[in-house]
Image (cartoon, helix red, strand yellow):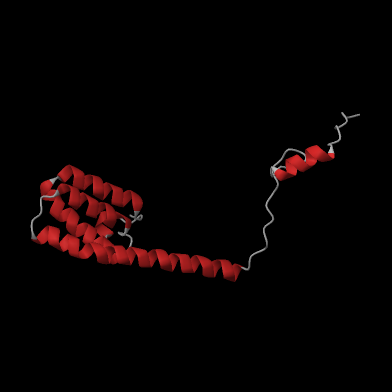
């Protein structure tokens, strides 16, 4: 015969429920309504489109900065690296990747080690399984 469980008093049960705990001291499982798969998919697609648009906006904002840095032969390491940081997040779209590569090529002559760090960060973040030989030209 097993051990008898002590009955829970109504006051204790109420305190447990107010704290989000069932009387057996396990967290209550939130009640989730069954979602329509189409609604969930539409929500995800909307979110993806919004993130993609934000990447495009960042690339558009950075484009004149990249062109100015390169055309003026800027030596402002802080501004170059801030721009590369911004572009790294947008390198998943063609415009962002093109700007990122252009600024990396320029920055390589100023600081090869730092540029290699940015290239490595890009590869970890965005690069797929394709080899360097298969990579599309910039």
In the picture, which quadrant includes the C terminus? bottom left
Considering every residue shown, the one lying at the far right of the view is 1
Q: Residue at x 69, y 49 (%)?
A: 29
Q: Residue at x 26, y 67 (%)?
A: 60
In the picture, which quadrant includes the N terminus? top right
Q: Residue at x 13, y 50 (%)?
A: 76
Residue 109 placed where, x, y %?
Answer: 10, 49
Q: Residue at x 88, y 30 (%)?
A: 4
Q: Dividing the picture into quarters, in which one does residue 92 lie?
A: bottom left
Q: Is residue 69 left or right of residue 55?
A: left
Considering every residue shown, the one lying at the far left of the view is 72
50 up-or-down from 2: above or below: below
Q: Is residue 56 left or right of residue 72?
A: right
Q: How many marks?
A: 0
Q: Nearer the viewer, residue 58 or 90?
A: 58
130 up-or-down from 19: above or below: below
Residue 91 placed where, x, y %?
Answer: 30, 59
Q: Is residue 49 visible?
A: yes
Q: Is residue 100 left or right of residue 72?
A: right
Q: Is residue 138 visible?
A: no
Q: Dividing the picture into quarters, in which one does residue 71 lie?
A: bottom left
Residue 98 placed where, x, y %?
Answer: 23, 63
Q: Dividing the picture into quarters, in which one does residue 129 lie?
A: bottom left
Residue 118 placed where, x, y %?
Answer: 25, 48
Q: Nearer the viewer, residue 82 or 100?
A: 82
């Amino acid at each position: 015969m097993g051990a008898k469980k002590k009955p829970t008093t109504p006051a204790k049960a109420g305190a447990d429920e107010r704290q989000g705990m069932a009387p057996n001291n396990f967290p209550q499982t939130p009640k989730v309504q069954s979602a329509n798969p189409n609604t969930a998919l539409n929500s995800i697609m909307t979110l993806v489109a919004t993130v993609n648009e934000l990447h495009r906006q960042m690339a558009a904002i950075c484009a004149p900065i990249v062109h100015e840095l390169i055309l003026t032969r800027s030596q402002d390491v802080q501004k170059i690296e801030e721009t590369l940081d911004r572009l790294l997040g947008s390198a998943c779209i063609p415009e962002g990747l093109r700007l990122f590569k252009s600024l990396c090529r320029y920055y390589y002559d100023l600081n090869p080690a730092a540029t290699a760090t940015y290239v490595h960060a890009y590869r970890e973040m965005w690069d797929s399984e394709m080899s360097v030989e298969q990579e599309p030209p910039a």
